[in-house]
Image (cartoon, rainbow, N blue to C red):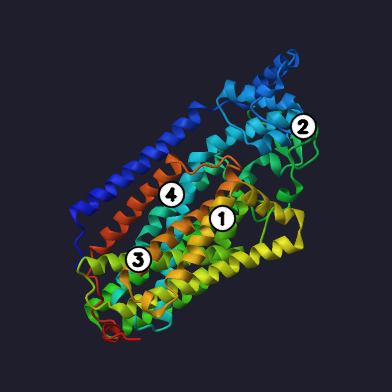
Amino acid sequence: MYTFTKNTKKICFALIAIGIIAISYGFYSASEKHYSDDEIKKTVKTLYQELSTVTVKDKSHSKYKSNGDYKFSDLFYAIENKLHCHFSQEEIERAETIDDVIYITKHYFHAQKQRPWSSLFVSNLFFLMISLGALVWLAVQYISQSGWSASLLRVPQAVTSFLPFGGLIMLFIIITGALHWHHTYHWMDAALTNEYVVEDTIGTDYPIYSNEKIDGVVKNKKYDYIIAGKTAYLNIPFFLIRAFIYLIGWCLAAFMLRKFSLNEDLEGGLRWHNKMFTTSAIFIVFAAVTTSTGAWDWIMSIDTHWFSTLFGWYSFASFFVSACAVIAIITIHLKYSGYLENVNENHMHDFGRYLLAFSIFWTYLWFAQYMLIWYSNIPEEVTYYLIRFESYHILIIIALILNFATPMLLIQDRAAKRLKGQVLFVAILILIGHFIDVYVMIMPGTVGTHWHLGFVEIGTFLGYIGFFTFIVLNSLSKVPLSQKNHPMLIESEHHHI
């Protein structure tokens, strides 16, 4: 039996505390600096009028340099001083009218309000999908009748125990989005999907929208016919129903596999093993569909205009290799702590092969998706990469180095794969790299160019590490580390390649 030590618990609680402080600070900071759209519009117009009446004697004192009109540079500078915000040079150069300045300023404050929600969403989704990836990994072991992993299957079983916790938080994020507490999914805004608006309600807090041309309505200027065309799939009731189906199906499969495994320990024989095989086979079919549709729903729909037929596979590859890395990290931790005596360098070799193979697979899908969109040069598609390569290029480069170059250079050799320390080091780097990958998937569509990797984001991530680790290790301490009556246990104990 694994002993969940007090020191380990203290570390988990400390990380959780950091996460709570970070996300609380994020929400407090967002509310403290928030201005309404009307306040922003009024302030920008007032500053514009003030600047229009002043003759700029020395334009060289302007904070920004551009080839365009200095008037907007000075206006942005005045807005920064007045509202305590910051604009990029790209935003300043893009502004051609006063309405553009107002829009850019509004976008900045919307992004600041969205920041803590996005940080929570990124971390929660990352660890939720790691749990799902571990469940897929576990099911694959049963379906393939794999012998090498029989002595360490309790580890992925424990990782799946995070599914209901991450699932509940995911539902909270979706429901609060539907209530318009945040704008992670901007397609939930009725203004984008209704062609008409009641004229008398324009400018009020709650405009009334309609798709029927009735008395008292006018054309809705915010109407987006592309998003409106997707409402048969992207609507709040159906979105919630799908989320419940995904989470119930995943959690039920994890519960059944764990229950059958414990029953196998008590009774022996092949009855429960065969049930695990059947359950895994059914789950894999369910997972093949829901991992793709879940990625479309929870990630791809953030950038509602954009779509990619490769995205489901690409996101799954990211989460699956992250799950492999977590399983390897926990297994090596247990090995270093004196547990799992039967796990040897051959098991490390297999972990190394998993990490290398799926890192290459992820890179292939990343490049295939990018290359096809770049080559076709369709405006609706290239916009997805434009913002990422303009504002997130540093993170993309870091992700490619950690997720592809690192495993290729450090664990391609047979001898390197058999070293616990080497596999552990690469697994940690891969985990960091794929967190960055998920960050780049989500943040451009929620906060645009106003992204940060500061205390809020890193603190929330650390908090989730503590939360996830506590749930997993606590689950691991409740049952024997090794299955007693697995039919291939002896093969795993004598595993040699």
Amino acid type, label 1: Ile
Query: At numbered mark 2, what does the secondary structure look like: helix, strand or loop?
Result: loop
SS label for mark 3: helix
Determine whether label 3 and label 1 are within 8 Å by CB.
no
Kindly identify the amino acid type of the residue bearing the numbered disc 3.
Answer: Leu
Q: Around disc 2, counting alpha carbons within 10 Å, would you say few (fewer than 14), some (14 to 19), or many (20 or more)?
A: few
Residue 424 tag number: 3
Q: CA distance from mark 2 to mark 1?
A: 31 Å
Q: Given contact means CB atoms under 8 Å apart, are the residues at marks 4 and 1 in contact?
A: no
Please name the residue that numbered disc 1 is placed on. 396
Q: Secondary structure at mark 1?
A: helix
Which residue is pictured at 58% across the width and 44% down the height?
446
Marker disc for residue 68:
2
Q: Residues within 10 Å of mark 4 (few under 14, many from 20)?
A: some
* Amino acid type indicated by mark 4: Ile
Among numbered discs 2 and 1, the one appearing first in the sequence: 2
Looking at the rendered structure, the kind of residue marked 2 is Gly
Q: Assign a secondary structure to mark 4.
A: helix
Distance from disc 3 to disc 1, alpha carbons, whole Å, reads: 23 Å
Q: Residue 304: where, in percent of width, then height? A: 66, 51
Q: What residue does disc 4 label?
A: 169
Earlier in the chain: of badge 3 and badge 1, it is 1
